[in-house]
Each structure stands twice: as C-alpha cells, then as structure tokens.
Image: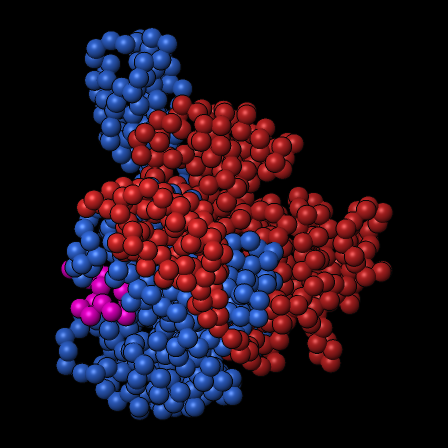
Chain colours: A blue, B red
Amino acid sequence: MVNQNNRTMRLGLLGLGTVGAGVAQILLDPKGRHPLLTEISLHRVGVRSLHKPRSLHLPPGVLTTDLEALVHDPDIHLVVEVLGGVEPARTLILRAIAQGKHVVTANKAVVARYGAEIFQAAQAQGVYVLMEGAVGGGIPIIHPLKQALGANRLNRVLGIVNGTTNFILTQMAQGRGDFATALATAQSLGYAEADPSADVDGADAADKIAILATLAFGVQVSREAVYCEGIGGIQPVDLSYAERLGFRVKLLALAQRQGEYLDIRVHPTLISQDHPLASVQGVQNAIVLGGEPLGEVMLQGPGAGAGPTASAVVGDVVNVAATLRADSGYHPLLGAPATRPIPQLPMDEVQTCFYTRVLTQDQPGVIGQLGTCFGRHGVSLASIVQIGIHEQLAEIVVVTHQVREGNFWLALAEIRQFPAVADIPTVLRVWS
Amino acid sequence: MVNQNNRTMRLGLLGLGTVGAGVAQILLDPKGRHPLLTEISLHRVGVRSLHKPRSLHLPPGVLTTDLEALVHDPDIHLVVEVLGGVEPARTLILRAIAQGKHVVTANKAVVARYGAEIFQAAQAQGVYVLMEGAVGGGIPIIHPLKQALGANRLNRVLGIVNGTTNFILTQMAQGRGDFATALATAQSLGYAEADPSADVDGADAADKIAILATLAFGVQVSREAVYCEGIGGIQPVDLSYAERLGFRVKLLALAQRQGEYLDIRVHPTLISQDHPLASVQGVQNAIVLGGEPLGEVMLQGPGAGAGPTASAVVGDVVNVAATLRADSGYHPLLGAPATRPIPQLPMDEVQTCFYTRVLTQDQPGVIGQLGTCFGRHGVSLASIVQIGIHEQLAEIVVVTHQVREGNFWLALAEIRQFPAVADIPTVLRVWS
C-alpha cells in the first residue's frame, strides 16, 4: 500500500470532534514523538460541516464533507475512524477495508457489535484494523493483550472501564451527595453527557468488556448476551456500609472462563479495599488481567478524553506504519531504540521537595531559626511542625516545597551547627 | 533465519534456574497459549551441571554444559539468556548476535551497562534483542514504551521497580519491626537473597530505571552516573510520621527531562497517600509513565518470580516469531484475532458472593430465619449483622460466600415474603 519511492503514509481521518482534533494535533506536530510520525501525512479530514469554527490549523484543502469519497480515495493508505456511534462508522470502515486500506478506530460500539465481520473482511483483504483507543483511553491494553502476554493462558479480565460511573461512585463514597447530585456534578464537569444512559446503565462498559474478552480468550462474544446492570439504584448508605465492611463499590466489567462457558457481565460490585481496583478514583480506568503463569497485572490511567484517546489511536497508526516498513526488512519497533547522548543532572541541581526530622533542645525560637536559615538559602517550606518530644529533645519535622537540592544541603549543613540542634536523623525526598 | 520449509523456530536457552525453568515449562506446554508457540521448539538448554536433579522433563539430548557451542549452533535461530549476572552473559549474548541469532534476555545488569553495545551489534547484524523480562517481571512495560505510546512526548518515568525493598517498607509501615527485622522476614520468605545488598542499596532499581529512561527518552544513560540511595537508614518512626503527614515512603526510581538534562535517580521518597504508587504493597512493582498528550498511566503487577518473568520472556519470543512470519505477509500479532464460538454463562449459573441489605421488624429470631432460608437454598453466608435501626426497622446486612446466583435469588424471593421483612432495598455482588 505504501508508495515505496515516497516513504510517506497518507492518512484519512473520519471525524474532527474531541478525539479527532487530538489525533490531528499530534500528526501536525510530530517533533519529539516517534520518528515514524514524520513520515505520516494527514491527507484528508472528513467532517460534517466545513464552516464550523475550529482552533486547529489544517493545511488548505484537507477538510471535506464527502466521507464516502475519503474512504475510496486511492491516495489514502490508512483510514482513522473516530466518528463514534454505529452508523455511518461501520459502513465506512467496511468500505475502507474493501478498498484495501488499513483502519484504526476508537469505536467501541462498532467493534463490540461488528468486530467479527470487520476482522474477517480485513483478513480477506490483507489489511490491519487496530483499536487500542476503543478500551481504556490512553491505557495500553489491547496491545499487551495481543502481544506481550501471548505466553499466558489468560483466565480473567476485569476492571473499571467507564470513567463517568467511577467518578459518580467516588463522589458518593466521599459523601458528596446521592446518585442524582453526583451525576449532576459529573455533567457540570463534562464527565457525563446530557443523556448519560449509555454510561450509567453500563452499556459502554459492556461494549468494552466484550472487546477485551474476545481478545483475551479468542472467543466470539455476543454483545447482546452480556448481562448489564447500571449504578442508578445505588444509595449512599450502601456505600458507607460497604466501607465499614472493608469494601468499596465499583462498576465492574468482568469476563472469565467457567468450564466451557464464558462468564461475562457488568454490574456494581463490592470489592475489598485491599484490592488494587478499590483505590481507582474518579474518572480513572483500570483493568486487571489474570493468567498462568503471569498471575495478575493491573493497567491504570485516564480512560477517556482527547489526549489519552488520541495517544492510543496514533500509537496504532505508528504500529501500522512500522509493520509496513518491516516488510522491507528490519522491524523499527522491535529493533534497537534510537538513542542520543544526554548529560545527566548532577544531584545538586535536582529540583525536589524534602522531608527532614530534626532533634533540638526544647527551647523557644528554634523553629524560627530553622525557618530563617532555610529561607536564607532559598529553601521555601511547606510546613515546619514540632511533632513530639523524644528523650527530652523536641522533634521537629520540616517539609519543603520544590527546591534546588544543593541549596537544601547548604542550609542543612548550617543548621547542623546550631547549638540547639542535637541531631538530624532523617532526610527524605518527597515526590509531588 | 527461519527455515521456510519447516516453520519451526528453534530456540537455545541459556540458564535453567528459576526463570529458565519457567520459560522451558511454557514452551513444553503450549496448549491454550498463543498459537505461534506450537511452532517454537526448545532445541538446546545450556546449564552448569547435567546431573543436578530437576523436576522438569526435558527431551533427551537437550541439556548441554557447552554454552559456547550453543550460541554457535547453526540450527538455533533464537537464544534466550536467563543466566543473570554480567559475565558470561554479556559475552554469550554478543557471540549469539555475531552468529546472526535473535536474542531475548531478562538480564537487567547487562542491558543497563552494555545495552548500547548490544543494540548496535544487533542492528549491524539485522537481528532483534528483546528484554521485556528485564524490568517489572510480568508487567508489560518495555513493549508499551516501544510501541503503544509512540504518539507521545514522554516526559517522566517513575516507579517501584524492586519488590524486595517494597516488601520491607510495607512490613515496616505496618508496624512489623524495624529494617533488620523486616529484612529477615523477607529473607525467610524468599523475597530477599542471603546477600541483599543489590536490592536494599538500590542498585537493582538503578539498573531498571537506566533501561526505562533509555527507552522512554531515546537517550544514552550512564549507569554509573545514576544517583542511588538505599533504604537501610529508614527508621519506623519516619514511616509513621510520614503517614501522619499524608504520605507513604517508597523506594522510587525516577527519570525525567529537566531542560537539556536527564534527571535520573533512585532514593527512598515520601509520596502522597493519594498517589496510585502509594497503594502498591509488598513485592508488587508499579511503573508510572507520563507524557503529552497521554497524561499518566500506571502499570502494576508481580515484579519478579519464575512465572511472571517467564511470561515476559516468552512474550518476547512470540514477538520475534511473529515478526519473522510477517516478513512473508500478514503480521500475526497485528492481524485479526483468531476466535471461536463459546456459550455465554446464563446469569443464574454465575458463581458470585452477594451483599444484601434487608429491613425487618425489630424482633428476635429474624436473623435466624434469614440464615436458615439462605442455608436451605445452599447459600452459605460469610456474615449476617444487624448494622442499625432505620425508621424503627432493623437494618440487616448479609454477605454471602461464593454461591450459584440462581440459588441466591430463590432464597431472596422467599425472604421477601417473610411477614417480618419490610424491604430489601439493596442487592450487590461482591468480588472476591
């Protein structure tokens, strides 16, 4: 498909909404990203209206409203579909495949319902259909499932794959109102749509677990047969009882083998506070993959939004480009990383926060002396607290803001000489 | 390299310790794993002694003590190095490359120190050197860095990459003794070696962050110049003060761009309890990758051990096999997933734990009636507790063990008819 004289891969983008704009932005500004991105050009962008005001500066002539013509354009090697919804997305994907074009999509609704049809058509045409952006936003999940975990017998996939419902449940668990209040908050922050039903009823999560189960177990999943229960009936009182019992309530999507059956379902679920999924807060997503001999891994990150989803979509584009390039030799993604020399920052120049514990004589003015000395060296403090008395010495804990490491040590060397200071038993850096 | 008539890829394994045995076990038992594994044969296994008793049943003639001959064997296409330590591993890897063989290694010490030399040799020979097992055990981290995240400008990598020290810090934070006691516990459980210095002094973590920084930023890292501070000086009192201040103490390995410099270091660090890394307990590892436009993702899992590391190593073997196969056409890992039909489990047949809240008249014997009714339907209870009084009704919370869902609903339908039962406002499933 790729013109071998001119190494550029020409891309047609269907949709310029939140995710589409994010994809275009990356492609138009490839510096500092994977080198293959400099060889990919944004050839056409299919939109509903040419006249909508946009902040993005696209080259002239790129925008078109003729989506059909785009998927038939012989100059285009790869179609990125980020329209969302089932139609016309499904039809356009199938037409692009029929024209021998590779496809990258973030469309969970289409893949969950028509994945088998689409992959069959792609295989028949010898083209690739990738879909990292369809599940878990920016979390690399489809790739690890298809590639890095191939040694395993996978036996379970479960996770929090809908950020809207996790935000609502987190709000409720933190005592910020009932379901209706938390939903209204989510809507006001742009985390929930005006019609939130696909999220709160679990349909979006069911789309995603259907895709994950297909990949994890190599089975055909009937999306319609996925049991699906939403969070609309959850009451704050249940969240606080669950908390008291050592649990937290999450909308879990899960799929596991049960003998010859596939157990696949979406429902609100109590999960032990010790389980890593219990700590996943707000709009974050997280997915646990279990297998033999792996045990369990959890992949966590932003489950939606322009940046994260575009990261996944363009990652797929890079993969297709790399694989086509590999046909003529060395696979650029499996090959040696391109590296350049770089100076390593001396520790004195590091910017970090510090925690230090100082033992002093229990006398007035010591805290002031410490603070003044740090200040003289440009070390700004977040807190300085006498936290206790230890063998007749006052125990003072200092936490700094971000400072130049060298300045901190100069201040500390001076403080060590104060007559009132008996010992500085601990210095630790603080990550912020 | 691969014999095109016979599609089998022949593999030479260097080392049959914990990880090597795990690798061999997967290769000898490919059923239910990636289909490509059936086309990979374990041709030779290089060990120190032929006479050591082993639980593994290798085909006769596979074991050899002549490691040099193995890396020169013209029948071998790919060498897996899991000897550990710098020599003879480094020399054997370079010889295998010089013979035109692909290499998969889990050797962080060699890759951190001699990665540039090894990758240069590999590129010159047109062979691949993969190393997913060198960092984070079974967590897919090298793959996502090299492949799925290519769209991003990565700006930081940080994480808990040494399970031994995280176990020790977790023990200390939970009040189970000081450093020496926690180290002794780790040693008795096999989580720390007799000489624990490479772990507790941070050298192992420094090897790993050097590798991650090279991949994330495409820079040459001098392993010797990585600042490295261990956990030997941490006192329990600091862990409890940190806790009171809203932090937890972790041995963090981190690398980030700071202008034209690379800021790379390993040291014990206070991290906010709200940060996902703060919840990573015991021997688990977790790595956060930050980039634009991605934001941050965290990948968490078992950081060491035979199964997880073998999962990563064999995942790399599958990748090499797939890429060689792709040279003659369609890339099997990017292509359509192979799927087969599977029946989906009806909800009645699902095995799950339940939580339910029941409002009853506040009278004696009600709890007994509930318990008896559940028992009659084979629903075994984990707990049944009157948790409060709500509008003059007793509020009873029941948590079941794992039960057949259909049985639970039969019991609940009966309970709903009890004269004493006013309402059953909530039923939730419990993940265990």
State yes or no: residue A196 in magenta: yes
Tell me where residue B339 appears, x and y as whole percent.
54, 77
Image quarter of residue B250: top left
Magenta segment: A188-200
> Is A364 located above or below residue A50 in the figure?
above
Q: Residue at x 31, y 91 (%)?
A: A69
B399 and B147: which one is in front?
B399
Q: How many marks?
A: 0
A363 and B346: which one is in front?
B346
Q: Is residue A218 left or right of residue A100?
A: right
Q: Residue at x 40, y 23 (%)?
A: B237
Tell me where residue B368 appears, x and y as whole percent.
40, 46
> Is A407 located above or below residue B156 in the figure?
above
The answer to whether residue B398 is seen in the rendering is: yes
B29 and A249: which one is in front?
A249
Q: Residue at x 58, y 47 (%)?
A: B304
The answer to whether residue B142 is seen in the rendering is: no
Q: Quadrant of the N terminus of chain B?
A: bottom right
Tell me where residue A48 appears, x and y as whole percent.
21, 83
Dominant SS type (magenta): loop
> Is A253 located above or below residue A275 in the figure?
below
State yes or no: residue A298 in magenta: no
